[in-house]
Image (tube, rainbow, N blue to C red):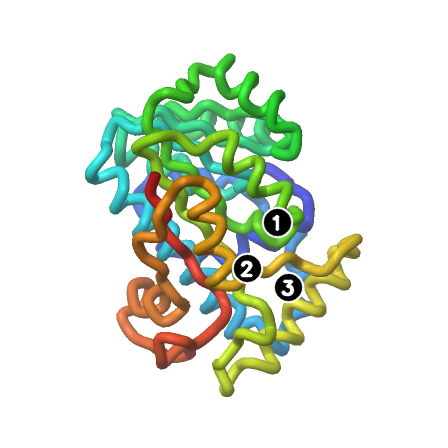
Amino acid sequence: MYEVPATSAFVLLFTPPDFYKGQAAGRFLEQVDLTAGEGLRSQFKEHWDVAYAAIGSRKARVRQLSQSYLHKNPTAQVISLASGLDPMTLALAEQFPGAAVYDVDMSQMDVKADINATIDGPKVNFVTADLADTAALRRVLADHGWDAELPTLVIAEGITYYVPASVFAQTLGTVRTSGGALVLEYSIPDDAITDVKYRNVIIDFYKELSNLLQMPFPLVRYSLDYVQQLAEQLGGTVELTLADYHGELALTGRNEYFETMDSGVIRVSLITF
């Protein structure tokens, strides 16, 4: 078993047990010791069930939209930005062997590559790079074989919160390609939440998370208007946005927590270029 930092383990605790059943990604998770994340989880025990439903279902939406693009473009390139030890890239590489997959983050890429080799996982390029240094990012991706002239699916899950929006827009502009797409996961701001049932729970969760992580600035949240503007800035079109309602239904077959289309706070959009 591989011991990983508490924050990495905490994030992986939101992955539903059967989400990657029978896949290389599932074998990957079996190699990771998540014990270090239990202390962080205990600090969110009051809100855990709702948070688990929302964050677990966001993964279902990211997978759905990524698969939707790759079914139409099975030989496209895939770049996953700052997914840490999450094994989504392994699942996509296994399902779409014709796609060249690049997993990019500032750290943990050596550990991820080691685990993938241990489980005899699919071909994935594990790239260590600073997403804010766009020139270096583009260079190191090219060194690993990425071609900026070919269609690329960019996946951004669990990262928008921690990077100033203007900086991340530059990062996205560096890796977006003609004929490609972006699967963008984000949370709408507090003043846009219309979910009466869980509004206070959601606000408290993000406040506690920000304090716990000792963020130098508030967690970044994207309004639907901003996402539309971002898509236009990047030369793209928002094709589809899935809410917590869609994710929970896809993941469990029912809506226990998110009963209406505007429930919850997490959104996942597919932007095409």
User: Which of the 4 quarters of the picture holds residue 124?
Assistant: top left
| Residue that numbered label 3 is attached to | 41
Q: Tell me the element at label 1.
A: helix
Image point 41% across, 62% down: which residue?
A: 57
Instruction: Classify mark 1: residues with Cα within 10 Å, few (<14), some (14-19) or many (20+).
Output: some
Q: Mark 1: which amino acid? A: Ala
Eyeballing the image, is 76 above or below 266? above
The residue lying toward the viewer, choosing from 138 and 32, is 138
User: Looking at the figure, which quarter contains the C terminus?
Assistant: top left
Asked whether residue 46 appears in the rendered view, the answer is yes
Q: Mark 3: which amino acid? A: Arg
* Image side of residue 145 versus residue 216, left or right: left
Q: Tell me the element at label 3.
A: helix
The residue lying toward the viewer, choosing from 198 and 137, is 137
The residue lying toward the viewer, choosing from 139 and 116, is 139
| Residue that numbered label 2 is attached to | 222
Tell me which label, 3 or 2, sits earlier in the chain.
3
Image point 51% across, 74% down: which residue?
A: 50
User: Looking at the figure, which quarter contains the N terminus?
Assistant: top right
Q: CA distance from mark 2 to mark 1?
A: 8 Å
Q: Mark 2: which amino acid? A: Tyr
Residue 253's spot in the image, x, y percent? 27, 70
Tell me which label, 1 or 3, sits earlier in the chain.
3
Instruction: Classify mark 2: residues with Cα within 10 Å, few (<14), some (14-19) or many (20+).
Output: some
| Residue that numbered label 1 is attached to | 165
User: Looking at the image, which residue sits at the far bottom?
Assistant: 196
Nearest to viewer (mark 3 / mark 2): 2
